[in-house]
Image (cartoon, rainbow, N blue to C red):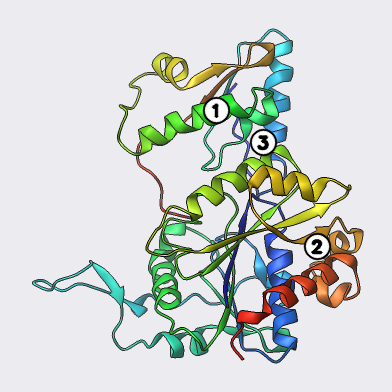
């Protein structure tokens, strides 16, 4: 299953994704939760906490500023830019290689 | 007055900035309300019936010619920013002029020239003629990547939630990063329900909270009905709180 949650700001994307991720994980599935938002808050809703969320965000920022190399495969991506959350959900704060236009 | 409202998605930026613009205009001031969100935003909160207005035409920006100096794209020299505002903005209630950078109807690539034109026009708009009230898209992507440079005051709209506070802190940090354009950074508490919410927001963002807009069922109903809060519920606590914000920031307005 590869599920993307989209919608207008404030409509509940982050909350919805986090509950889906944790529910799936509780039923025994291996779950990776990807935060692709330019303002990433998924860690908060998953229950990873403020500090760890900001740590992952600062790693992505270093990547976007060219101080870090992009991961070249999935395993490296989720191990380097990820963190273990409750129920065994693996959270990764990720970025596109080419940043899209503002907006 | 050049005021940009920023904040997490859903914090209430459009409702607050739209109401703010209308209240200011009722005092007889020239108000330009601008919206740089590609998704529906400010129009309904201002009281316009439709969300889509024609974007600025593509030929308002020109490409640098072979052998010329400077940036690749610039505002067409035939376009005066002040006239551009008059020509391409539409009139909203209370005489507010409304300019937006284009709504996505199809391929977003079709809009990039008019969006660039919008940015040039706003950034080059002479000071002192308009009070500019801007509604920026939610989150952090656009707020300080060249789209908020026109503002001298940044108002961060924050709800009493962990995610909104975190977004507010990030935005406050980003607003403070540009030493060439020092800005006053203020917070407005939104959807306040409990005693202690305002204090939580002040503490969590480290900012001065200049207004507390309560959670308001009438405001929510205005949003359901696609009506401007100031038209649907002019006496509601949320609208009155925004009016007090106008009062508070009025010392710097252009009459």
Q: Position of residue A7 (x, y in %)?
A: 65, 46
Quadrant location of the C terminus of chain B in the rendered image: bottom right
Tell me residue B52's x, y (percent).
Answer: 61, 72
The outermost residue toward the top is: A28
Please tell me which residue lies in front, B128 or B145: B128
Report in which chain the residue with disc 1 lies. A
From this view, report whether residue A26 is shown above or below residue B232.
above
Q: Earlier in the sequence, mark 3 or mark 1?
A: 3
Name which residue lies at 45% across and 15% down.
Answer: A79
- What is the secondary structure assignment of the residue under circle 2? helix
Are circles 3 and 1 on residues that touch, CB within 8 Å?
A: no
**Secondary structure at numbered mark 1:** strand
Distance of label 3 from label 1 (alpha carbons): 11 Å
- Location of the N terminus of chain B by quadrant is bottom right
Pointer 2 residue? B223
- Which residue matches tag 3? A14
């Amino acid at each position: 299953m590869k599920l993307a949650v989209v919608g207008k700001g404030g409509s509940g994307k982050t909350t919805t994704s986090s509950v889906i991720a944790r529910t799936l994980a509780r039923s025994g599935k291996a779950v990776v939760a990807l935060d692709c938002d330019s303002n990433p808050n998924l860690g908060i809703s998953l229950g990873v906490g403020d500090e760890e969320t900001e740590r992952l965000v600062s790693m992505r920022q270093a990547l976007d500023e060219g101080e870090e190399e992009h991961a070249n495969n999935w395993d490296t991506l989720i191990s380097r830019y990820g963190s273990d959350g409750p129920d065994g959900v693996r959270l990764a704060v990720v970025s596109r290689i080419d940043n899209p236009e503002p907006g | 007055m050049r005021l940009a409202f920023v904040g997490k998605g859903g914090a209430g930026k459009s409702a607050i900035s739209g109401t703010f613009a209308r209240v200011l205009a009722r005092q007889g001031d020239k108000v330009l309300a601008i919206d740089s969100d590609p998704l529906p935003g400010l129009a309904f909160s201002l009281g316009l019936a439709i969300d889509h207005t024609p974007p600025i035409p593509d030929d308002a920006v020109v490409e640098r010619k072979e052998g010329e100096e400077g940036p690749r794209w610039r505002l067409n020299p035939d376009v005066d920013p002040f006239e551009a505002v008059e020509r391409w903005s539409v009139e909203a209630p209370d005489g507010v002029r409304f300019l937006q950078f284009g709504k996505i109807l199809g391929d977003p690539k079709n809009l990039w020239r008019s969006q660039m034109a919008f940015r040039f026009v706003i950034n080059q708009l002479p000071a002192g003629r308009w009070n500019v009230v801007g509604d920026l898209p939610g989150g952090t992507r656009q707020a300080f990547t060249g789209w908020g440079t026109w503002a001298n005051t940044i108002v961060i709209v924050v709800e009493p939630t962990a995610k909104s506070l975190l977004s507010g802190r990030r935005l406050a940090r980003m607003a403070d990063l540009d030493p060439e354009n020092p800005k006053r950074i203020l917070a407005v508490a939104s959807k306040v329900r409990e005693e202690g919410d305002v204090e939580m927001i002040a503490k969590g963002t480290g900012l001065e909270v200049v207004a507390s807009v309560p959670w308001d069922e009438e405001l929510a109903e205005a949003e359901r009905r696609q009506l401007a809060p100031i038209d649907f519920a002019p006496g509601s606590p949320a609208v009155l709180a925004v009016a007090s914000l106008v009062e508070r920031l009025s010392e710097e307005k252009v009459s």
